Image (cartoon, rainbow, N blue to C red):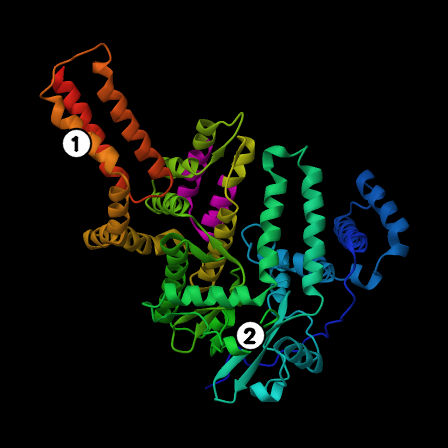
Amino acid sequence: MTDSGLTQEPTFEEYVERRPRGLVGRFFQTTAQILGLFYGWVYWHVQEQRAQGRSWTLVVLCLRIYLFFGWLFVDKNLVKRPFAVQFRVRLERMGPTYIKLGQILSLREDLLPKSLTDELKSLLSELPAVPFDRFKALVEDDLGRPLAAMFAWVAPTPLGSASLAQSHRARLHGHDEVVLKVLKPGVRETIKTDTRLLRLLGRSLQPFLARYQPMQLIDEFARYTLLEVDLRNEANNAEIFAANFKDQPDVHFPMIYRAFSNRDVLCMEYFAGKMPSAQTVEALTPAEKTRVLDLGVGAIIDMIFRDGFFHADLHPGNLIILDDGAVGFIDLGMVGRFDSETQKRMMYYYYALASGDAAAAARQLAALADAGKGSDIDGFRQAVEDLNRRWLRTPTFHEFSVGQLVLQSVAQAGKYRIRYPGEIILMVKALVTVEGVGNLLEPGVNITEVSVKHIRKILIRQYNVLNIAKDILLVLPELLDVLQRSPLVLSQGLRYMESSFKSKRQGPLTDVIGTVFAIGLLLAAAIMAAGNVHWIVWGGLILIAFSVAVIERVRR
């Protein structure tokens, strides 16, 4: 096995292990870094203004006074470095929660300066690493066995070091090449403290920004982040993804070695390949670029719209272009899930965008909205339709990306007092990543054009006659069970239909009995439909109700 791409030995700063701070200490630590970052921005803004001959304007004079009084309290060496470097270093100092924010921002070349996004890309896998001796101790403590008893060899230099964990290559005694991922010490406690602070912030903002639901947004972020610091969740996710893509041999997810995995340690299959970068792409032929782009986009589309179970922490460091031209996905700790209704609506929305139907896309997105008091659904739908039409004029990565479109569309929700499921933002993150990687492979790519054929395959598969027949067979036991449990309703309906033609009206209520009975059947069907009972079951009740209504009409 060749050790290309991923096996180069980068140099890492040493991870300084400190005792996790409490709530108050963490608050002051975070605030200090934010104020330091603001000071650094002011410093470079003043330098730019002075270079342009604006040293003595009123605003610049005020800022210079601010810099003078703050100079004694800042890290002078850091302040003098380029602002992009300051931003990256401040995020690193604030810890794993904010590093993850920087990883997302590193993808937004359509919104942020390239100098900033280039600097933030080093947050993907080049963060300070735990020394090797400490790494070995962490593995042995969590698995309860000596390292030599489990592994024939472990590389002393990390493959990568990210915000929550670091990974090393290793080899089992059975000669399987694996990756050993270990949670960094103190990370779990820091994440818990940060999420408590964020939840307090959300409660403080809720009375003033209720229309934007800050408590709900922060609670969702906290829930996902806390799941990510238990590596057993990542192991479960990897096995679910592998099962979903078992019929797609060119899309890979790492096999998990459960015997050597636990809460803080994850042992998984090693992928020989390279992360997508400008250098990696230059080495690919045009045909290979097209294949990788199609596989990556197709995999994301299938995750979101076919399975409703998708990678929610996707960035270029989590994608691997394998040596045989296939693609692999790693770092599966954070996933998004769509229920069947949201999954269907989002697929129709995306397909309408890809087909150029701005009005239909707006209708589908509006149908997902959670309307509350004072909501203006019609106004929201019109605003989104106008936004869609703007996007259709220049639907490319640099002009107006689809990720930017969805983000701006959902951002309109606050203005019109409606809310959306948090999973939609996670979906946007996946789309933003695949757009960014697609732009490396094919600059200026229109990702919806690439993905439309994959959406069509899902639609064809969903409405294929054979698949519908399979669904009927799957639900047949449920239907029979409902029929068995409802003999009274069915027999009463049949007796009613049988006697309706034989009897004459006998009282003042005779005219409404059939109508009431039909309405009752329709209500029962509606309840079943809302409870996700298969359409064959509630469809049968609707058919009986319709038959009763027809008989009533004939009798009259």
**Residue at left 51%, top 80%?**
178
Relative to residue 310, is residue 266 depicted above or below?
A: below
Q: Is residue 12 left or right of residue 341?
A: right
Disc assigned to residue 7: none
**Residue at left 17%, top 12%?**
506
Label 1 – label 2 distance at C-alpha = 60 Å
Residue 510 position within the rendered picture, expressed as x and y whole percent measured from the top left: 21, 15
Pointer 1 local density, CA inside 10 Å: few below 14, some 14–19, many at least 20: some
Three-letter code for the amino acid on which mark 2 is drawn: Ser
Determine if residue 397 is in view: yes
Q: Do the residues labelled 1 and 2 touch (CB within 8 Å)?
A: no
Q: Closer to the N terminus: mark 1 or mark 2?
A: 2
**Residue at left 51%, top 53%?**
429
Relative to residue 397, is residue 56 depicted above or below?
A: above
Bounds of the magenta span? 383-409
Q: Quadrant of the C terminus?
A: top left
Q: Mark 1 points at which residue?
A: 494
Q: Which of 267 and 296 is in front in this view?
A: 267
